[in-house]
Image: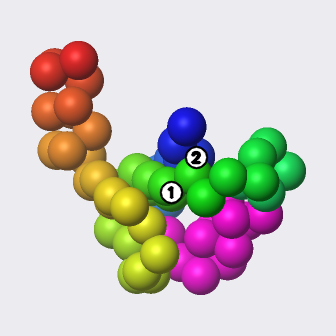
Amino acid sequence: MTAGSVRWLENAASGGHDLAALQQHRTAVTDEPAPLVAVSRSGTGRSGLRAAYGPGGLLGARRRG
């Protein structure tokens, strides 16, 4: 299981409040230490993610999958 978040903000990176919300939602779903993944148009500014993708990474993953 992996928990993830997509933030498509115009001018701001995904931040600490987004990561905190994702961690909170993960604990509502499972007690297991599921990896966290984020997709953000303007980047991510926080550690604690297994992976983070921008627009190019998202499209590339879609093409491969």
The question of residue 5 being in magenta is answered with no
Callout 2 secondary element = strand
Chain part drawn in magenta: 12-25
State which tag comes first along the sequence, 2 or 1.
Answer: 2
Disc 2 designates what residue? Answer: 3
Estimate the spatial distance between the alpha carbons at disc 2 and disc 1, rounded to whole Å.
Answer: 5 Å
Task: Inspect the image, locate mark 1, and give the three-letter code of the amino acid beneath it.
Answer: Leu
Residue occupying image coordinates x 69% and y 74% = 20
Is residue 17 visible to the viewer in this orientation of the structure? Answer: yes
Q: Position of residue 1 (x, y in %)?
A: 55, 37
Q: Position of residue 6 (x, y in %)?
A: 51, 47
Quarter of the image with the C terminus in it: top left
Q: Quadrant of residue 43?
A: bottom left
Residue occupying image coordinates x 27% and y 54% = 54
Q: Going by the image, does 21 lie left or right of 42? A: right
Q: Which mark is residue 36?
A: 1
Q: Position of residue 34 (x, y in %)?
A: 57, 52
Residue occupying image coordinates x 43% and y 67% = 49
Q: Is residue 39 above or below residue 1?
A: below
Q: Nearer the viewer, residue 40 or 25?
A: 25
The question of residue 19 being in magenta is answered with yes
